[in-house]
Amino acid sequence: MAAADLSHVLTTSGEFGASYTQRDLLIYALGIGCGHYPHGERDKHVDAKFTTELHDQFAAFPLYPVVLLFKGTSQDTVAYPPPNLSWFPDGIPSFNPAGTLHAEQSIEIHRPLPSTGAAVTCHRRVVSFHPKGATSALLETEYKLVDESTRVPLCTIVMSSFLRGLESRFTGVGPKASKKPSMPHRKPDASLALPTWPSQAFFYRLSGDYNPLHCDPDMAQALGFQEPILHGLCSMGVAARALLHLCCDNDPTAFRKMSVRMTKPCIPGETLETSVWRVEGAPTVHFQTRVVERDVVVLDGGEFTFGPSARL
């Protein structure tokens, strides 16, 4: 079998457009559970800055850009996989894209997203491509979002995906992803449990991720799950809400960078508890998110960096 030709993988790049409105920001905020505190976890109005455009400090929830990669410029449903994310660099070994798993995600905010809506250009490039075991590989792709009207960079997103079912006898290219932190063997410095609800995946998908795994029982079972699962990025959104509360007094301008590894699925209706551990001498915490009812970690190796308003 001929060796994979990876000589052009790291030079592969491209761009695509995306846009959003205030309505999109509202739908996303509600989809990750903003304002949903059925047991008094927080004041029910604490998230009004994310859930109503009438608030005098109305703001985009900082994690919103991750769904723009799925949504693009569409104001309707989007076929899955979305065209913007069903792209793979030339030269990698052949594989079935249906076997791709979302492994890790990070986002660094350079400037807050305009709360009035905006059109952005997403600049895409491959960061690295390395074998993982005998039949898998890890593809790391960077997306830099730039405001089309001001040409100002808004954020940088890095998405890592496991490509399964390919011949992985090749030498990887690009820097290997940095090792995610391990949680300390001590009690967390703070924790916050936030409930999801049974139909949350149906609401979250309206932001652009229409993967049938999250709404179709037959598809979920065909992929090895007993029932539809919550989107991994929705679980990340719930964790981001907890981090803003625990570290930043729910101030979105304090959000700087968040990265996490997705380890297990959450079933809609379960409770997600996010625990944080301070990093001495830095405006950073390490975090982990678990399903309370099953005591299963769904997000691990998390790192969150925040700004001057943080209070931890």
Image (spheres, rainbow, N blue to C red):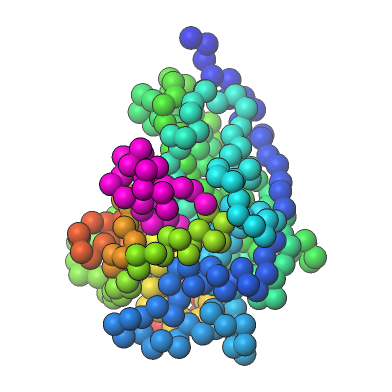
Q: Is residue 96 above or below residue 250?
A: above
Residue placed most toward the observer, 3 or 40: 40
Residue 221 coordinates in the image, percent (x, y): 33, 42
Whether residue 184 appears in this view of the structure is yes
Residue at 48% x, 62% y is 204
Asked if the stretch drawn in magenta spans residue 166, the answer is no
Residue at 59% x, 46% y is 79
Q: Is residue 132 above or below residue 215?
A: above
Q: Quadrant of residue 268?
A: bottom left
Q: Quadrant of the C terminus?
A: bottom left
* Residue sitting at the far right: 149
Residue placed most toward the observer, 248 or 218: 218
Horizontal relation, residue 73 to residue 27: left or right: right
Q: Is residue 106 above or below residue 213?
A: below
Residue at 32% x, 71% y is 195
Residue 1 coordinates in the image, percent (x, y): 48, 9
Whether residue 156 appears in this view of the structure is no
Q: Quadrant of residue 102?
A: top left
Residue 300 coordinates in the image, percent (x, y): 33, 55
**Magenta residues?**
210-234
Residue at 55% x, 43% y is 81
Q: How many marks?
A: 0
Horizontal relation, residue 36 to residue 77: left or right: left
Residue 263 coordinates in the image, percent (x, y): 33, 50
Horizontal relation, residue 255 to residue 184: left or right: right
Asked if the stretch drawn in magenta spans residue 216, the answer is yes
